[in-house]
Amino acid sequence: MLVINKGALMKMAVLADIHSNLAALETTLDHIDRWRPDQILVGGDIINRGPQPRVCFELVLARAEQEGWPLIKGNHEDYVLSYLKGDWPTSGPAYEIQLHARWTFDQMEGLIEPLAALPDEWESEETAGTQIRMVHASMLGNRDGIFPWCTDAELREKMAPAPAVFLVGHTHRPLVRTVDDTLIVNVGSVATRGINRVPYSAAKGGVAATTVCLAMELAEYNIRVNCVAPGGVDAGERAVARNQGLDEYDQVDADGIKGVMDQTFRDTPMGRMGTPDELAAAIAYMASDDAAYVTGEVMHCSGGGAGLR
C-alpha cells in the first residue's frame, strides 16, 4: 500500500495471519522483497494452526530485528501463551480446538519470551505525519474482526479513536474501505483462505479440487460430479456422544460449545445456523434433472459465510 507520511510517499507492505505456513511466508516475502517497500509490518497470528511455527517465528523475528519491522500479537499467539498460565481446558470442544495450540507451545521452546513480549498494537509517530495504527482484529479485541458487511457505525466503534490509516487482519478477508477520514485496510491472510485450520482447509480444498477433476474426466460419459459445501448447520443433539468411551473427555464443555456457536454466528452474514432441510434441498437440486447441465461446481450453502473466519 502507498501512504503519505511526513510529506513523503511511502510504500508499506503489511502481512498477517501467517499461521506457521513457511512456504506461504517465504513466497510472500519474496514478492515483498522484489517490491522493495519502505516499511514492512506484521499484524499477528504469525504462528499456530500450521506445521512450522518455530521456523516461521524465527524468520519473522530475524527480519524484524535486522530491518526494524513492527510486529504485534494476534489471537493465536494468545492461545499459545495461555499455556504459560496452566488454565487450558481438559475436555470438550474447547479442549479439541486448543490441541493445536498446545502442540505449537511445545515447539516454541526458547522463543516464548520474545513471543510474549509482542505488543497488541502498533502506531506510527503522529508528529507531522499520517497516524497509522495496526491491530490484529480491531480495538475491541483480537477476535472481534472487521468484515465487508460491517456498518460504518460498527467500524467507527471497532477502530476508535480513529487514526488516518487503520490496518487489521484476522478475518482472512482482504478489504479496503474509507469511513469518515479513516482508510481501513484488512490485509487478508498469508497462510490460507478458509476456516483458519490448515489440515481442515487442506481437506476441504482437496474435496473441491477432486470434484472439478472428476467432473472433467467423467463428463464424456454424461456423469456429473458436484459438491455441496455447508456452513454451520443446526443438526440437533448428537445421537452418539462426542468422544464416547474416553472417560476423561466425557464432560462436555458448555463454554467451549458456546464459543464455537458464537464464532459461527459472527462469521455468517445471515446471522444464523442452517437447517438440515436447507442443506438437503441444495443436495437434492444438484442431484436432480434441474441441474442436468451443472457439473464440476462447488455450491456453498453457508448463509454467505463461505471461506470466512
Image (tube, rainbow, N blue to C red):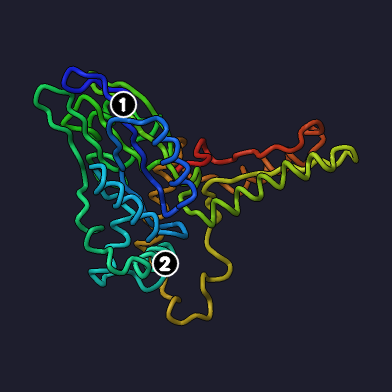
Residue 302: x %, y % from top left:
54, 41
* Circle 1 residue: 11
Which numbered disc flags the more N-terminal residue, 1 or 2? 1
Q: Is residue 30 left or right of residue 186?
A: right
In the rendered image, the quadrant that contains the C terminus is: top left
Q: Amino acid at mark 1?
A: Lys
Based on the displayed image, in which of its 4 quarters is residue 268 positioned? top left
Q: CA distance from mark 1 to mark 2?
A: 39 Å
What residue is drawn where x is 38% and y is 64%?
104
Residue name at image x 57 percent, y 70 percent: 240
Which quadrant is the N terminus positioned in? top left
User: Which labelled disc corresponds to residue 99?
Assistant: 2
Near-viewer residue (248 or 234): 248
Q: Nearer the viewer, residue 64 or 169?
A: 64
Of the two numbered discs 1 and 2 in the rendering, the one whose residue sits closer to the viewer: 1
Q: Nearer the viewer, residue 174 or 149?
A: 174
